[in-house]
Image (cartoon, helix red, strand yellow):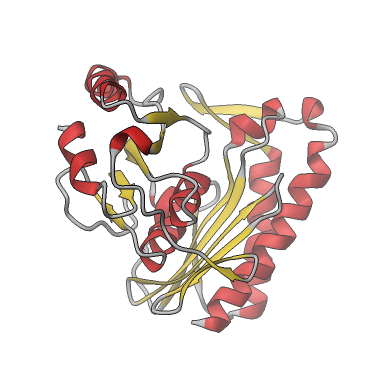
């Protein structure tokens, strides 16, 4: 698992440097709309290509499922990397400093290693199954906050799935009425890393993709937290609703989301 983590770290660093270089001329980038309010730029595809090159060199024969170049590829296999080369594309395009590279390594369907690299901030979050979660080489743990009034909760707006808006507004109201703070940063990979490090006490979003959450799932769990769907069932990387927390607040979050 350490080999898979280290390969993921190297790939993430190469991609992040490419993204930083392109950020100097972000207003001149070629950008297209994949679907309503879902943008992709030449930076996304270029970063994913560089990740693939590094991983194929360091872990020959491994498969790669990537948001931009192979989103429908199978995650079944002995070793599969699940990659989001630029989580937070809209943030990047606007110069808003919350976007990341997210890479998870799966072995026989189980998440074995995870890397989330905060590109603007430089923080590197890593985890291996059974080996704990780390930020820049220091062990991280979820928070001990045990009451909503002291909690800071991350979220993502359902702007790509408008059918979820009414339900989301009800969830937002219930959490707000509990006097919890709510933040929307725009990168689920970072949101989950921040739950793992105790900067957020919880997080929810109506629907995310495998590459959005694969690394974050392991980070949160290895930091002592919980990650489930809205019914409280453990999740694997998939297209799914996501609830993550420090564990203590999980049942309250689940009740608030019903």
Question: Residue 57: which quarter of the image?
Answer: bottom right
Expressed as whole percent of the image width and height from the top left, the position of residue 22 reads 80, 41
Expressed as whole percent of the image width and height from the top left, the position of residue 77 reads 37, 74
> Residue sitting at 66 percent across and 65 percent down?
11
> Residue sitting at 49 percent across and 22 percent down?
37
Q: Is residue 239 visible?
A: no
Expressed as whole percent of the image width and height from the top left, the position of residue 72 reads 40, 52
The vertical placement of 92 against 75, above or below, is above
Front residue of 37/74: it is: 37
* Quarter of the C terminus within the rendering: top left
Front residue of 95/144: it is: 144
Question: Residue 252: which quarter of the image?
Answer: top left
Relative side of 87 to 162, left or right: right
Q: Is residue 76 visible?
A: yes
Expressed as whole percent of the image width and height from the top left, the position of residue 67 reads 50, 48
Front residue of 4/51: it is: 4
Relative side of 114 to 203, left or right: right
């Amino acid at each position: 698992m350490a080999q898979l983590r280290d390969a993921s770290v190297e790939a993430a660093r190469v991609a992040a440097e490419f993204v930083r270089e392109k950020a100097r001329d972000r207003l001149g980038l070629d950008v297209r709309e994949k679907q309503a309010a879902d943008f992709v730029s030449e930076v996304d595809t270029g970063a994913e290509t560089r990740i693939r090159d590094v991983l194929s060199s360091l872990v020959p024969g491994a498969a790669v499922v990537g948001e931009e170049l192979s989103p429908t590829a199978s995650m079944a296999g002995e070793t599969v990397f699940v990659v989001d080369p630029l989580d937070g594309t809209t943030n990047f395009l606007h110069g808003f400093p919350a976007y990341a590279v997210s890479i998870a390594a799966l072995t026989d369907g189980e998440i074995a290693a995870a890397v989330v690299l905060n590109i603007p901030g430089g923080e590197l979050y890593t985890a291996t199954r059974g080996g704990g979660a780390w930020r820049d080489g220091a062990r991280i743990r979820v928070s001990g906050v045990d009451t909503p009034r002291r909690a800071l909760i991350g979220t993502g707006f359902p702007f790509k799935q408008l059918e979820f808006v009414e339900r989301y507004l009800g969830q937002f109201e219930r959490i707000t009425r509990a006097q919890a703070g709510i933040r929307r940063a725009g990168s689920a990979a970072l949101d989950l890393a921040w739950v793992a490090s105790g900067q957020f006490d919880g997080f929810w979003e109506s629907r995310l993709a495998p590459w959005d959450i694969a690394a974050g799932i392991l980070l949160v769990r290895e930091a002592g937290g919980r990650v489930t769907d809205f019914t409280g069932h453990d999740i694997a990387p998939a297209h799914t609703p996501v609830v993550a927390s420090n564990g203590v607040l999980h049942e309250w979050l689940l009740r608030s989301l019903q």
